[in-house]
Image (cartoon, rainbow, N blue to C red):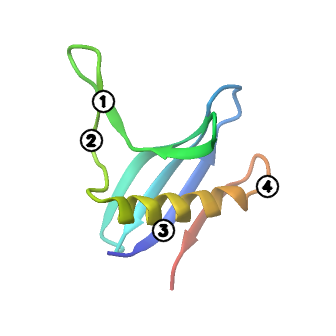
Amino acid sequence: MEITDIRIRKVSAEGKLKAYVTVTFDDSFVVHNVKIIEGDNGVFIAMPSRKTKNGEYKDVAHPINTGFRTLLQDRILEEYNGMAPGEMTNTEDS
């Protein structure tokens, strides 16, 4: 499975949420609302989630192994770190 498109929309408000990301895989499957969060040890990605009846948040889509999660996070953060302030971006692998 290849990441074929990454679109990042930075958030201008103050806080830990820095951007929303849309990721396309194999030009065939898209995941919206991946978040870039500023944590105590730097930025990281958080997968899209929904709130359950008991108030917990559960991911609605997520990698099932550490290797792919690392690859996904590295690609997204590489793109995010290369952006100018206020810029929106998208990349497409050829």
Tell me which amino acid carries mark 2. Answer: Val
Mark 2 packing: few (<14 Cα in 10 Å), some, or many (20+)? few
**Disc with the residue nearer the chain's start (4 vs 3):** 3
What's the mark number on residue 60?
Answer: 2
Q: Residue at x 40, y 48 (%)?
A: 32
Q: CA distance from mark 1 to mark 4?
A: 30 Å
**Disc with the residue nearer the chain's start (2 vs 1):** 1
Residue placed under numbered mark 1 in the picture: 50
Residue placed under numbered mark 4 in the picture: 84
Residue placed under numbered mark 3 in the picture: 5
**Disc with the residue nearer the chain's start (3 vs 2):** 3
**Disc with the residue nearer the chain's start (1 vs 4):** 1
- Picture quarter containing residue 10? top right
Q: Position of residue 59 (x, y in %)?
A: 30, 39
Tell me which amino acid carries mark 4. Answer: Ala
Mark 1 packing: few (<14 Cα in 10 Å), some, or many (20+)? few
Asked if marks 2 and 4 touch (Cβ < 8 Å), the reply is no
Q: Position of residue 55 (x, y in %)?
A: 29, 15
Q: Residue furthest right?
A: 85
Asked if marks 2 and 1 touch (Cβ < 8 Å), the reply is yes
Left or right: 91 in relation to 70:
right
Tell me which amino acid carries mark 3. Answer: Asp
